[in-house]
Amino acid sequence: MTNRRIRQTIKSVSVFSLVMLILGFQGCNQGTIYEGKYEFDTKAWHKDSLVTFNPVLNDTSQIINLGFSLEHSNDYPYSNLWLFIDVKSPNGHTQTDTMEYFLAEPDGQWIGKGSDDSRILYWLYKRGVKLSTPGKYTFSVRQGMRRDDLSGIHAFSLWVEEADIENE
């Protein structure tokens, strides 16, 4: 790859990361419907450890955004995080997603707010969702990084908020 293409790729990834970060922070300013947090006692996420959230979402007339946040330290060894996400609705329907989220710029600079000891990053998972079934949903999340233990992970959260339709 030429130097020009490398610079263009880095610039594209940086712009994408900035846009996702801004969207994530905008999401935090809207009406929170649910927020669940799982704290890792060992400051590591084992590959077999399932993080589960069970929000009760009854208002099917409301349009919502779903997102995750991750709190990590400088000990986290990668610039990204792969997640396997299963969402089970009250009627038993299950949707599975595989998502990759970026924690650092291509130059290694961490994204998010905080210090090296504790940095938090917000990701928008689904925007503008209108639920068809009221009730209890189950979000089950596993890390998919091909490593038994991911060090430097302090906490993982799910948040559900009212969507700002006018600005979407």
Image (tube, helix red, strand yellow):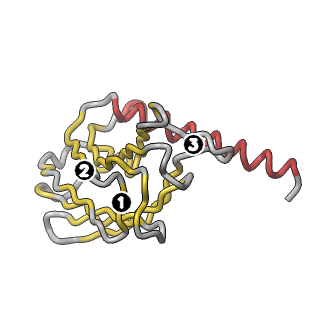
**Residue nearest the viewer, comparing 110 with 125:** 110
Q: Position of residue 110 (x, y in %)?
A: 55, 40
Q: Is 105 or 100 nearer to us in this picture?
A: 105
Q: CA distance from mark 1 to mark 3?
A: 24 Å
Query: Which amino acid does the dot numbered 3 rest on?
Result: Ser
Closest to the observer, 5 or 94? 5
Residue drawn 18% across the image and 59% down it: 137
Q: Secondary structure at mark 2?
A: strand
Does 104 appear above or below 28?
below
Circle 3 sits in a helix, a strand or a loop, which is it? Answer: helix
Q: Which residue is mark 3?
A: 17
* Label 2 vs 1, first from the N-terminus: 2
Distance between the Cα atoms at labels 2 and 1?
Answer: 11 Å
First along the sequence among labels 2 and 3: 3
Q: Which residue is mark 2?
A: 38
Residue depicted at 36% across the width and 44% down the height: 69
Q: Nearer the viewer, mark 2 or mark 3?
A: 2
Which one is closest to the eye, mark 2 or mark 1?
1
Q: Which quadrant would residue 135 be assigned to in this image?
A: bottom left
The quadrant holding residue 14 is top right
Query: In this image, 17 relative to 150: left or right?
Result: right
Q: How far across and down, in percent of the image, does residue 73 sit?
A: 44, 43
x, y percentage for residue 31? 25, 31
Distance between the alpha carbons at the discs numbered 2 and 3: 24 Å
Q: Which residue is mark 1?
A: 45
Circle nearer the viewer, 1 or 3: 1
Q: Which mark is residue 94?
A: none
Q: 69 or 55: nearer the eye? A: 69
